[in-house]
Amino acid sequence: MARYELVKRSVALITLTNPPVNALSSAVRHAMAKSMEQALNDPKVTAVVICGENGRFCGGADIREFAGPLRGPPLVPLLDAIEAGEKPVVAAIEGVALGGGFELALVCHYCIAHFKARLGLPEVTLGILPAAGGTQRLPRLIGIPAALELITTGRHISAQEALKLGIVDQVTEQNACEVAVEFALRAVAKPLSSRRVSMLTTPCPPDLDALLEVVTMEVKKKARGVMAPLACIQAVRAAATMPYSKGIKRESELMATLFNSGQARALQYCFFAQRTAGKWTLPSGAQWNNSKPREIRSAAIIGLGTMGRGIVVSLARAGISVIAVESEKKLLETGKQMVIGMLERDAKRRGVSASLNLLKFTLSLQDLKDVDLVIEAVFEDMALKKRVFQELSKVCRPATLLCTNTSGLDVDALAGVTDRPHLVVGMHFFSPAHVMKLLEVVCGPRSSSETIATAMSLGKRMGKVSVAVGNCPGFVGNRMLKPYLDQATFLLEEGATPEQIDKALEDFGFAMGVFRMSDLAGLDVGWRIRKESGLTGPDVDPKNPPRRRHGRRYCPIPDMVCEQGRFGQKTGRGWYMYDKPGGTNAKPDPLIQNLLEMYRSRYAIQPRNISDKEIIERCLFALANEGFRILEDGIAARPEDIDVIYLFGYGFPRHRGGPMFYASMVGLERVLERLEHYHQAHPDVPHLEPSPLLKKLVACGSPSVQTWREHIKTMHSHL
Ligand code: CAA
Ligand code: NAI
């Protein structure tokens, strides 16, 4: 857990050895305490160097241990003792120094960092704060404004930035450990008092209160309802206004409040869920760690519309050469200019050069014969997509993977028209594709494990969070969206307004309520789909009662909004009104209010007062209920996968953990009881009928979300 060696006859080299990130588990803390004691007591030792095995200094506390009671020596006294020691201690940072690892570096009297190292205090992203003195030492070392920024955002910084801020003393391209040993030898005779950061006075700006106020407002705006950044600000205030001994107590009190909050549990769950989601398994036994992905050097995108452009940018940014295909010259030229502009802006922002030499634009599918992989992103039209796949099947070499970005059509039906159904897979990106991190990899029944592995690995290479899902209408994300949207419009019928529903969802933590989000995405897309599927427009069966389709409740208000040419932000009118087409400042529109009133009086609906609680329960429990059905059907393998999809694709608030984790936090019994209640009140809404899996889990005593998998007995898994 920590290796102790004497090097250069007088330097104690302590190496943290807890792969993969040398986290400060109880065993590591114990070993470190012992090694430090040995170093400080051995008269031969004149200086100490602390480093981490395998080129990684330390990834911080062992997050897995947060779930249980504290074991082993606590970190704060251990770090205080290192700082107070009379022998110089040098941190040799390679790889990462994060969280407790960064705090360990802060108590060392000197820091040497490898030029590729990254440092940061990401605790806030786990719902806690840097409680091993980080909130007290960092402001003393780099000042309040810079410390506030790092602590409240959890941003990782480069070694160069750390040098500029005064966090590290030297950046090296050599082996940091060897440089640190030489440095330590030179430091032996130097006084240490000025190197003990806790003894420094915090440089305090004259307008401290005003500064803290501004940061508080910013944090509240960015992370609505999230506790940890606010507690971080309070802890930093303590560093500015209290001596270290009192500040560290304040830090610890704030930590205790956060540590026991549901938000910390949710955020820590998200950390592990994100890492679990990449670990896919098929019923055949093929899985992430026994299936080899193919190497992808070249790709092609068909269709340079909203999605195609973003996908081209994502691929080029990952160093893959891309051929982009359009159907007409003018569209090709427009798409090309847009892609180039996007790539140039992106490169400028990241301080690198745009990889324009990787791009080729064409009108001919014949140019695709040698590419390794194709992603189709033409209109959402099955007949068109089938034609494209048939053509690709003829043109591309037999080993080329054929992928579709369809947002909900049958991937297997597309596979069926090709000569290589095993090489067909869905790669469902989210808009805008070069920004959104989620990728649903849709596994058809005939997709081979190599094909799935390749799509998952390509997603990772593009910086996406890839989740393998089964093939059904809407897959996971869009399938679950339907009951959520339905509940929102039913609530409108019953008496709520778009702004009331949005406010309740935004207060819950969504960046945007459902109606503002729909205005942003464009209302015409869903309207076209509803018309094509005969739910509205001239093809509706006249025998249908007005607010029912296929024997279920149907709300025609979204269709009525579209019939007025209100397609959302792009037309300047939607559920809200905007200053101009393309405007983003949403204001409640009296015309929508009138439309709702007329609608209710036409159908003799007596509007009632609807509470925020009902809005949240109906929208989110219906969402989670569909998630349970998806698990039952084997379309998603784990609740973690569903949660990751909602966190990264649909803006579900991270501090709530995702819809399935949220349901578990509310209590499955309570979710079941509320769904039964709402279903009784609305028997014509099947989405409110509790799923058998939810009932089964409640009958099993509502086990923790991490163990649901054991209770999911699917008839046949689609994964
Ligand atoms: N504790 C426990 N496990 C950790 C961990 C930690 N601090 N950091 C990473 N891991 C685990 C991951 O869960 C993963 O496990 P599996 O292989 O079983 O999935 C494995 O280590 C590798 O992690 P990644 O897949 O994330 O590897 P990466 O190379 O992509 O990234 C990393 C490495 C940048 C260190 C990243 O893992 C990371 O950001 N870790 C968390 C860092 C962090 O938040 N530290 C603060 C902890 S809280 C704290 O320190 C409080 C305090 O004040 C004492
Ligand atoms: P879009 O309408 O913006 O772009 C489609 C493009 O395909 C157009 O530029 C069109 O000219 C081109 N095209 C049509 N037929 C072609 C052909 N035979 N050869 C070459 N190009 C052709 O559509 P969008 O929004 O980009 O959607 C594309 C696909 O991505 C659809 O399947 C959609 O369901 C899916 N999708 C869309 C999302 C969105 O938010 N817009 C999100 C996720 C998936």
Image: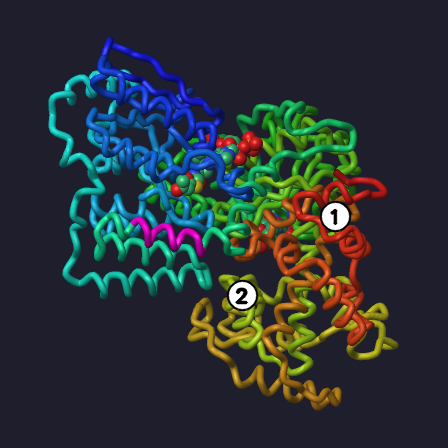
The spot of residue 411 in percent (x, y) is: 73, 43
What residue is rendered at 65% in x and 29% in y? Answer: 288
The spot of residue 125 in percent (x, y) is: 44, 48
The disc labelled 2 sits on which kind of residue? Phe
Residue at mark 1: 631
What residue is rendered at 54% in x and 64% in y? Answer: 517
432 w.r.t. 608: above or below: above
Label 2, secondary structure: give it. Answer: helix
Given residues 495 and 220, the one toward you in this image is 220
547 w.r.t. 268: above or below: below
Quarter of the view holding residue 56? top left
Q: Residue furthest top?
A: 9
Residue at mark 2: 508
The disc labelled 1 sits on which kind of residue? Leu
Label 1, secondary structure: give it. Answer: helix
What residue is rendered at 31% in x and 18% in y? Answer: 13
Given residues 172 and 91, the one toward you in this image is 91
Could you tell me what secondary structure mostly forms the magenta stretch?
helix
In the image, 242: left or right of 121? left
> Would you say residue 316 is visible in this rendering?
no
Segment tinted magenta in the rendering: 248-257
471 w.r.t. 237: above or below: above
